[in-house]
Amino acid sequence: MTTAKFSEIGRILREHQRFAVMSHVRPDGDALGSQLALALSLQQLGKEVRVWNEDGMLEKYSFLPRAELVTKPPSAPEDFDCAIALDTAIQNRLGTALAAVHSKLWINIDHHLSNPGYGDVVYVDPDAPATAEIIFRLIKSQNLPFNRDIAENLYAAISTDTGSFQYPKTSARTFEIAAELIRAGLDVGRLNQQLYENYPRRRLELLRELLRTMRFEHGGRVASVSLSLKTAAELGVLPEDNEGLIDHLRAIRGVIVAVFFEELGDGKVRVSMRSKNEAVDVCAICQKFGGGGHALAAGARVRGTLAEVEEKVLEEIGDVLKSHS
Ligand code: 5GP
Ligand code: MN
């Protein structure tokens, strides 16, 4: 894959007028924060921008500055000069946004190792801990508009995708960028409260139920929890409520791989995986099941019942662990 230069992307952004800025289905803080930050910068540049995500804005990120810009895509497609996919490892993870955008020119900006480099102009940096870090570098290097609203969106994106500046790809540069974002005037304490101390009660009720399903395999090196449709309905949880709960499993001493199984309505199970050891690449494991992601954080949607998928996936993880021990 050849990676574009920021100058090429900067030139394209200045030379075109109508943009669609999109991110992956079931968005996280990095997807939504990156979208808003780039869209706000483009708007300041006088561009016309649509900010689309299949799921629209999530309740828990609706405090982000100008969150109302993120909407679900319309059912009838619209024409654009340039489509921009952010934080999206494969193009079809854009979901309904993909079909809603007609554009000759596609830009793909991402940090997923498994990104195959779709689109005309590709900037994929697997060393970046968050797509938002790439957006910050693009904005600064190309002198694109920057302000406190953009800074808050980028900070929220970087903080959430690094597990609050903890995951291994967090670098000196990440902290330097965070410092620059804080200098733009954002209130770190207030933003962190909005991000991490404002959960709905049902999220903890979900955690309580998940911990009842916790199991350990392969000598305690693999920990997993499962969420059935029935439990999700009884608790009234939203898909967004489980972001980050897998970290409780990863935090256990001796656990190398943490797995979250979530029954979906379509005969599939969403598998979410985390690794604590660079030698155990969960992206490679998830790719065997049609998914992808990063070496230490990946996912897949696997056909089958909860019990079937649990068995298959835990066995595959066991095989990988055996080959490393
Ligand atoms: P999460 O477990 O938080 O849903 O996802 C972890 C990482 O894996 C994210 O970076 C996400 O983009 C990627 N990922 C999650 N599910 C899938 C999937 O079904 N397909 C692909 N290609 N990547 C996924
Ligand atoms: Mn990301």
Image: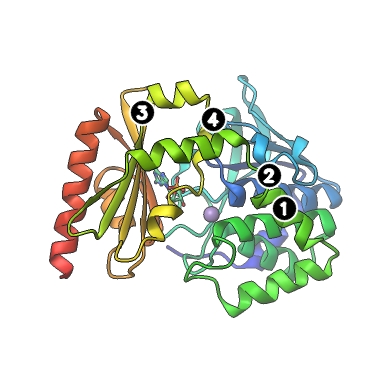
> Considering only order in the chain, which callout, 2 or 1, is on the residue closer to the N terminus?
1
Residue at image coords 76%, 37%: 69
> Considering only order in the chain, which callout, 3 or 4, is on the residue closer to the N terminus?
3
Classify residue 48 by image quadrant: top right
Q: Which residue carries the number 2 mark?
A: 198
Question: Which numbered circle lies on residue 193?
Answer: 1
> Considering only order in the chain, which callout, 1 or 4, is on the residue closer to the N terminus?
1
- Quick one: label 4, few (<14), some, or many (20+) residues within 10 Å? few
Q: Nearer the viewer, residue 24 or 166?
A: 166
Gap between marks 4 and 3, in whole Å? 13 Å
Asked whether disc 4 touches disc 3, contact meaning CB atoms under 8 Å apart, the reply is no
Position of residue 81 measured from the top left corner of the image (x, y, whole percent): 68, 41
The residue type indicated by label 2 comes to Asn
Gap between marks 2 and 3, in whole Å? 25 Å
Asked whether disc 1 touches disc 2, contact meaning CB atoms under 8 Å apart, the reply is yes
Residue at image coords 75%, 55%: 191
Q: Nearer the viewer, residue 125 or 283?
A: 283
The residue type indicated by label 3 comes to Ser
Residue at image coords 18%, 59%: 219
Please, is residue 29 above or below residue 79 in the view? below
* Mark 4, secondary structure of its residue: loop
Please, is residue 277 above or below residue 199 in the view? below
Gap between marks 1 and 3, in whole Å? 30 Å
Residue furthest to the bottom in view is 172
Gap between marks 1 and 2, in whole Å? 6 Å
Question: Which numbered circle lies on residue 231?
Answer: none
Gap between marks 4 and 2, in whole Å? 15 Å
Question: Which numbered circle lies on residue 228?
Answer: 3
Looking at mark 1, is its residue's CB closer than 8 Å to ligand 2? Answer: no
Looking at mark 2, is its residue's CB closer than 8 Å to ligand 1? Answer: no
Gap between marks 4 and 1, in whole Å? 20 Å
> Considering only order in the chain, which callout, 2 or 4, is on the residue closer to the N terminus?
2
